[in-house]
Amino acid sequence: ELTACNGFSLGHATVPGLALPLPADGKYLLSAEGVKEVSRLYGSGLQVTGEVLDGQLKLGGVEFKLVEAAYPDYQHLITDNKDETIAIISTREWIRALKTRDDRGRKPEHVGVVFSQEGCRMLFKADEASIKVNVPVQMFAGQEKRVSYHVERLKKALSSCGPSATIK
C-alpha cells in the first residue's frame, strides 16, 4: 500500500502482488502524482517487483521519488459511523452541472453541495452572485450533509468514474 498527501487531498493505492522490502515503520510516502502513476501502471493486478534505493522507489522500470516527511494519519479521516450519508449520483449530470458559469462567463472555483432527502443542490458563489443548481440523485440515505468541493478536482474525480458514483 502506498499513500500520498499534499495538504488538501489524499491518494492511496494498493498494488496487488507488489513485493517490497519494508522500512522500519512499514510505510512509503510518495508524491500525489507518484501514487496516481503507480495506480495507473500497476493497479491491474500485474505482478511487479520493487526495490528502494537512494530515496527512490523502483517498480518495474519506473522510478518514483519517496517523500521524506511524516506519514499522514489518514485513518482518522475515515468515519466509522454506520449511519453515514450515502448518495449515488449520475456522473454525467453532475459533471454537466459543474460546468456552470456566472453571468460574466467565469467558472466558480468552489461549489457547495447539499445532500438531503429532498434532493441534492449545488451552490456556486462568484463575487456577490450565487447560482443554485438542482442535481439528480439516484439514491440517497442518511442525514442531510453540506460539503464544499473544489470544482475542477470534483469534476476530475467524477470523470474517472463510470456512469454513476457513490459519494459518502
Image (cartoon, grey):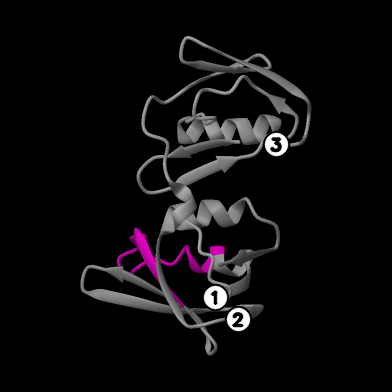
Q: On the image, numbered disc 2 is attached to which residue?
A: 141
Whether residue 106 appears in magenta in the rendering, the answer is yes
Amino acid carrying mark 3 in the image: Gly
Regarding residue 67, the answer to whether it shows in the image is yes
* Mark 2 → mark 1, Cα distance in angstroms: 6 Å
The reply to whether residue 103 is in sight is no
Indicate which disc residue 112 carries.
none
Residue lying farthest to the left in this orientation:
128
Q: Are marks 3 and 1 in contact (CB under 8 Å)?
A: no
- In the image, what residue occupies the spot 55% across and 63% down? 95
Q: Residues within 10 Å of mark 2 (few under 14, many from 20)?
A: some
Residue range in magenta is 95-114
Q: Residues within 10 Å of mark 3 (few under 14, many from 20)?
A: some
What is the quadrant of residue 139 in the picture? bottom right
Q: Secondary structure at mark 3?
A: loop
Q: Which residue is mark 3?
A: 43
Q: Amino acid at mark 2?
A: Ala
Q: Position of residue 124 (x, y in %)?
A: 36, 70
Image marks 2 and 1: residues in contact by CB distance under 8 Å: yes
Query: In the rendered image, which residue does mark 1 sit on?
Result: 85
Residue 101 belongs to magenta span: yes
Q: Main secondary structure of the magenta part?
A: loop
147 or 110, nearer to the observer: 147
